[in-house]
């Protein structure tokens, strides 16, 4: 083992809370779709910082924006006007809900918290308040108390019970149960158009449309959590666009600033007017550095039409992976859209697959014990996608 990795492992073991099951690698440098570890070994990165580095590592436009902003002004708070925040707001709002409004936070969980607060206040001022938020089983919305309670994975709640009251969970793509659960007490329905951390499970277009109709009938807000699926990842800027469904609030985070912590929730029409001074705020959210990085990121995603590349390369990759079903022992299904894909295995060997991928210079993610996920940069080429698929196939043939 190289010295740097050994040193970092020792420090981590001694001083950080042991909340992560880390793989034995320390990356020290990145460029585009490539990473280098502390021994100088090069990797093809099919994880992209868990769907964060949409432009690839150290994209020149983002690096320049960060460096220029860092040398000019980094922080003043939201007590004052912040030019990069205002410019980013314009860019995002015009792409999302023209004429509407957004709020900047620091993480996906915070964006979801804010969106749910907005829904509650909307009803508080309109009809005296509604106490229910409907989410999906298998969903993931964050790790704060409210977003954990929204998350439809009871195993994640247990040590932190009681969960917050007022959250109901319905099965994925089960329109009847959704329609029965959403009622006059429901403030919002919160959905990931493609469930990410739950294992890459897409919602059907019919289910998303039914959710929109159910919200329209009941007066509940439809909130789409595009923290993982947004920013062009699935072949559209927002994954819900594939179904034609327009939500009331959209949350974004991961890919927003290509790795600098940044998040936002955007609310359409009257919903953008709900929060007033004192209702919501953050010290760091909408800061100079994050907004400069986010502006460069979003501008590049849009100008270079990277969602189109994600859709095209993702289709080719999904096709190649799908050809392994029934051909490569243990591969049972391929799920996802664009460059948000998972390969389902019939055995709990995903961690071993990831380790063997690392040995061969390709970074994969084990989203569950039996599923391997890919969330690479949207700049991935078809050649790179085929290389990754080839390595995965070789590993899957050997792992059994
Ligand atoms: C769909 C979704 N929502 C929310 C979150 C939470 O984001 P964060 O870790 O930035 O709080 C995640 C993180 O994986 C996510 O995938």
Image (cartoon, rainbow, N blue to C red):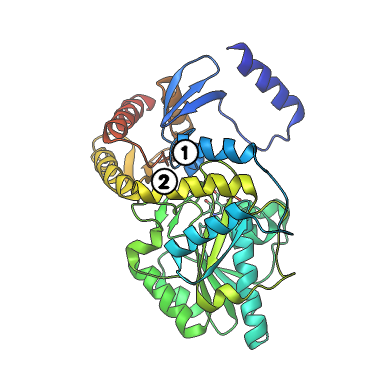
Give the tally of numbered discs.
2
User: Residue 61, which numbered label?
Assistant: 1
Question: Badge 2: how crowded within 10 Å, few (<14), some, or many (20+)?
Answer: some
Looking at the image, residue 244 lies above or below residue 307:
below
Q: Which of 142 and 329 is in front in this view?
A: 142
Where does the N terminus fall, quadrant-wise?
top right
Residue 257 point in image, percent of width and height: 53, 46
User: Residue 300, which numbered label?
Assistant: 2
Looking at the image, residue 52 lies above or below residue 94:
above
Where does the C terminus fall, quadrant-wise?
top left
Say whether marks 2 and 1 touch (CB < 8 Å): yes
Judged from the image, the secondary structure of the residue bearing numbered disc 1 is helix
Residue 366 point in image, percent of width and height: 47, 38
Quarter location, residue 152: bottom right
* Lateral position of residue 335 relative to residue 383, left or right: right
Residue 294 point in image, percent of width and height: 53, 48
Question: Badge 1: how crowded within 10 Å, few (<14), some, or many (20+)?
Answer: some
- Label whose residue precedes the other's in the sequence (2 or 1): 1
* Lateral position of residue 60 relative to residue 163, left or right: left
Q: Which of 269 and 176 is in front in this view?
A: 269
Residue 128 seen in render: yes
Q: Which residue is situated farthest in the front direction here?
A: 72
Q: Nearer the viewer, residue 304 or 376?
A: 304
């Amino acid at each position: 083992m190289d010295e740097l990795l050994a040193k970092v492992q020792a420090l981590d073991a001694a001083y950080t809370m042991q909340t992560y099951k880390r793989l034995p690698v320390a990356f020290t440098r990145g460029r585009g779709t490539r990473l280098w570890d502390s021994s100088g070994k090069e990797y093809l990165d099919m994880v992209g910082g868990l769907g964060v580095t949409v432009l690839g590592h150290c994209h020149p436009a983002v690096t320049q924006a960060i460096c220029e902003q860092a040398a000019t002004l980094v922080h003043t708070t939201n007590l004052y006007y912040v030019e990069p925040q205002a410019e980013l707001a314009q860019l995002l709002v015009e792409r999302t809900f023209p004429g509407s409004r957004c709020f900047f936070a620091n993480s996906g969980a915070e964006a979801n918290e804010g969106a749910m607060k907005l829904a509650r206040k909307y009803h508080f001022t309109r009809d005296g308040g509604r106490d229910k938020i409907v989410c999906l089983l298998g969903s993931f919305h964050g790790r704060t108390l409210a977003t954990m309670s929204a998350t439809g994975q009871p195993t994640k709640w247990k040590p932190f019970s009681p969960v917050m009251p007022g959250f109901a969970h319905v099965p994925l793509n089960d329109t009847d149960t959704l329609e029965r659960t959403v009622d006059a007490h429901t403030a919002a329905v919160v959905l990931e158009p493609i469930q990410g951390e739950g294992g890459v499970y897409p919602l059907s277009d019919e289910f998303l449309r039914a959710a929109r109709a159910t919200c329209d009938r009941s007066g509940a807000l439809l909130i789409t959590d595009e923290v993982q699926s947004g920013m062009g990842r699935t072949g559209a800027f927002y994954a819900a666009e594939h179904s034609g469904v327009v939500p009331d609030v959209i949350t974004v985070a991961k890919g927003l600033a290509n790795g600098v912590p940044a998040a936002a929730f955007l609310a359409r029409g009257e919903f953008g007017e709900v929060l007033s001074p004192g209702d919501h705020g953050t010290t760091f959210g909408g800061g100079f550095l994050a907004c400069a990085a986010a502006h460069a990121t979003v501008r590049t995603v849009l100008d270079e039409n990277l969602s189109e590349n994600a859709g095209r390369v993702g289709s080719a990759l999904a096709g190649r992976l799908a050809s392994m079903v029934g051909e490569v022992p243990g591969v049972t299904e391929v799920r996802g859209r664009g460059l948000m894909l998972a390969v389902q295995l019939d055995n709990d060997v995903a961690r071993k697959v990831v380790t063997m991928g690392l040995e061969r210079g390709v970074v994969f993610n084990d989203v569950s014990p039996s599923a391997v996920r890919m969330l690479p940069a949207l700049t991935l080429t078809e050649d790179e996608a085929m290389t990754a698929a080839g390595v995965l196939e070789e590993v899957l043939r050997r792992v059994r």
